[in-house]
Image (tube, rainbow, N blue to C red):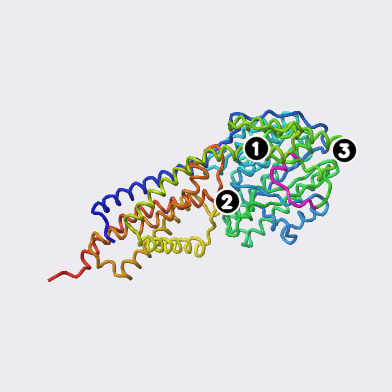
């Protein structure tokens, strides 16, 4: 198709503009995810009164990092844990994204989901220390109520829990079996001391997932079996008629190793509780946010102020009076949280005059959040419609019927890219497949370049397009790259409409954000490489065309 004479310089300018924009946009998007802060950051709800007399002498929490539900229920791999299931309470925990460790720790200790807990939404980079929790949590509440606390585990906890909220601690930079041995050895003396809240973090299962082949490798099960032996050591030091043992995990792992995304296997975890105050049984499905308020009820301390979960009262041996006190405390806590959240996001919430249940309060918060998001999405939708209308007009004017051919070219590129991404490399469409920032950038760039070059060679050699006039050969490359860029713009626009150009006061749909992110990376490479290929095409066409005379 014949293009206007200014098509080439405009195409080069637009390609450069798209490449530069994509570069800065991709960086800004990931920076905003790392920098995300809860709306409650500067307006934390006030903690309520203590629930009352504890129903246990101490709670010992064991966090087995990355332990999958299927691994935890495999009696061949973790025989002792499954023995504990028979004498205690068991459930399947459901979590939310981002399914990284530090966001999971924050949910487990605060009872607030990642968008509200104000814990880091991503794990710190190597050598960095996570910021301390700003919202109320089990350690803050226990210390406020005069209980002694202790924590032994990976050194991220040193940053998350300030020194004034832990009476004893041990931290390590190791993640393997040797590090876990040191962690447990440090904690064992505390189990016979006067500590009422103890957290022990076992990390070698996560280490096996990341560094030893993932959950399908035999070394994963070996790590889980060693963790099971450590659990037995810990429980053997407890008097379960007076003490309570609680086991949970922060996330699962995909079969290839990794977590962080929306994959179903990384969003379910085991839960086992046994000992004083626990009513044995299988309690089905629970939410990760239910764990913190339930432990608070065991200890008689206040429910963490930003809590969004229920106390699992059916799982506890409670007097009618204590159960009523819990219900009243939850209603008051939810009302305080609701008021703080409404003020933080600037959306008034008309709460019922009746005592609030957790379900009712969370529904009101969700409604207020959706209302503000809708008001923000409307102008972004209008901008996107105008932009695509302008693009549609240009396609109709300059490409007309060739638009179908261009669309087919773009779909072939997409097929080539995703065959490389999902089928050959076996990557998932989530953060779980991202080993590092350089990993996702380098892989996406390489897969994009390979797919584009294959398509370019097929079109320009297979169809003989090198025999065109040099300027026409260059124009054909830009037509190809613009068709691909238009296809990539669709998921990018969807994410922009839904969540904005970068992450603001609310966490986005993580699946949509991830797909938009890899599309932005592809757009950068397509735009930049398109300029190079157009030049190669023009030069090749000049020498490949038969000379007249």
Q: Of the numbered discs in the image, which one, if any, rests on residue 261?
A: 2
Q: Is residue 124 left or right of residue 146?
A: left
Q: Could you tell me how many numbered marks the image carries?
A: 3
- Residue 536 in sight here: no
Mark 3 or mark 1, whichever is nearer to me: 1
Q: Earlier in the sequence, mark 3 or mark 1?
A: 3
Q: Residues within 10 Å of mark 3 (few under 14, many from 20)?
A: few
Q: Residues within 10 Å of mark 1 (few under 14, many from 20)?
A: many
- Residue 287 is covered by the magenta coloring: yes
Position of residue 317 measured from the top left corner of the image (x, y, whole percent): 85, 42
- Residue 93 in sight here: yes
Position of residue 206 measured from the top left corner of the image (x, y, whole percent): 62, 52
Q: Nearer the viewer, residue 517 or 162?
A: 517
Secondary structure under badge 1?
helix
Secondary structure under badge 2?
loop
- Residue 73 is covered by the magenta coloring: no
Q: Of the numbered discs in the image, which one, if any, rests on residue 319?
A: 3
Q: Earlier in the sequence, mark 3 or mark 2?
A: 2
- Relative to 182, residue 197 above or below: above
Q: Of the numbered discs in the image, which one, if any, rests on residue 365?
A: 1
- Relative to 435, residue 419 above or below: below
Alpha carbon of mark 2 to alpha carbon of mark 1: how far? 24 Å
Q: Is residue 286 left or right of residue 277?
A: left
Q: Earlier in the sequence, mark 2 or mark 1?
A: 2
* Displayed quadrant of residue 208: bottom right
Magenta stretch in the rendered image? 282-294
For the N terminus, which image quadrant?
bottom left
Residue at point 27% right, 53% down? 7
Q: Nearer the viewer, residue 71 or 116?
A: 116
Position of residue 256 measured from the top left corner of the image (x, y, whole percent): 57, 59
């Amino acid at each position: 198709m014949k293009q206007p004479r200014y098509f080439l310089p405009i195409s080069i300018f637009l390609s450069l503009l798209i490449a530069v924009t994509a570069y800065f946009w991709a960086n800004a998007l990931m920076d905003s995810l790392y920098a995300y802060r809860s709306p409650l950051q500067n307006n934390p709800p006030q903690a309520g009164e203590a629930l009352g007399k504890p129903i246990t002498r101490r709670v010992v929490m064991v966090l087995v990092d990355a332990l999958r539900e299927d691994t935890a229920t495999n009696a061949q791999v973790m025989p002792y844990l499954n023995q504990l299931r028979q004498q205690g309470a068991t459930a399947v925990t459901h979590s939310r994204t981002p399914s990284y460790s530090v966001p999971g720790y924050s949910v487990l200790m605060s009872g607030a989901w990642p968008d509200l807990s104000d814990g880091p939404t991503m794990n710190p980079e190597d050598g960095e220390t996570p910021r301390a929790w700003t919202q109320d949590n089990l350690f803050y509440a226990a210390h406020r109520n005069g209980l002694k606390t202790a924590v032994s585990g990976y050194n991220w906890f040193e940053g998350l829990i300030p020194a004034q909220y832990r009476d004893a601690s041990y931290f390590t930079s190791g993640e393997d079996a040797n590090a876990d041995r040191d962690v447990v050895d440090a904690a064992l003396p505390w189990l016979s001391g006067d500590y009422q809240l103890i957290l022990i973090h076992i990390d070698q299962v996560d280490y096996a997932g990341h560094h030893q082949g993932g959950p399908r490798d035999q070394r994963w099960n070996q790590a889980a079996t060693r963790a099971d032996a450590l659990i037995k050591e810990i429980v053997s030091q407890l008097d379960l008629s007076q003490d309570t043992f609680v086991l949970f995990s922060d996330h699962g792992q995909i079969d290839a190793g990794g977590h962080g995304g929306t994959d179903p296997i990384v969003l379910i975890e085991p839960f086992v509780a046994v000992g004083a105050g626990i009513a044995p049984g299988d309690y089905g499905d629970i939410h990760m946010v239910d764990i913190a308020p339930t432990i608070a009820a065991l200890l008689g301390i206040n429910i963490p102020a930003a809590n969004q979960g229920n106390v699992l009262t059916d799982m506890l041996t409670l007097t009618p009076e204590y159960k009523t006190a819990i219900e009243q405390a939850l209603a008051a806590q939810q009302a305080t949280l609701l008021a703080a959240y409404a003020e933080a996001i600037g959306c008034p919430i008309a709460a019922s005059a009746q005592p609030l249940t957790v379900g009712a309060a969370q529904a009101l918060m969700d409604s207020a959040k959706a209302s503000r998001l809708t008001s923000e999405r409307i102008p972004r939708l209008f901008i996107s419609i105008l932009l695509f209308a302008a693009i549609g007009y240009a396609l109709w004017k300059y490409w007309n019927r060739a638009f179908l051919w261009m669309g087919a070219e773009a779909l072939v590129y997409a097929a080539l890219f995703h065959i490389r991404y999902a089928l050959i490399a076996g990557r998932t469409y989530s953060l779980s497949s991202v080993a590092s920032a350089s990993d996702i950038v380098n892989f996406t760039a390489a897969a994009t370049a390979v797919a584009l070059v294959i398509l370019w060679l097929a079109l320009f050699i297979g169809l003989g397009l090198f025999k065109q006039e040099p300027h026409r050969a260059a124009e054909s490359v830009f037509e190809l790259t613009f068709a691909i860029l238009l296809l990539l713009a669709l998921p990018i626009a969807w994410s922009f409409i839904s969540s904005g150009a970068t992450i603001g006061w609310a966490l986005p749909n993580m699946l949509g954000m991830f797909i938009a992110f890899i599309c932005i990376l592809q757009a950068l490479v397509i735009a930049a490489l398109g300029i190079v290929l157009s030049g190669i095409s023009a030069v090749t066409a000049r020498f490949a065309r038969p000379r007249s005379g």
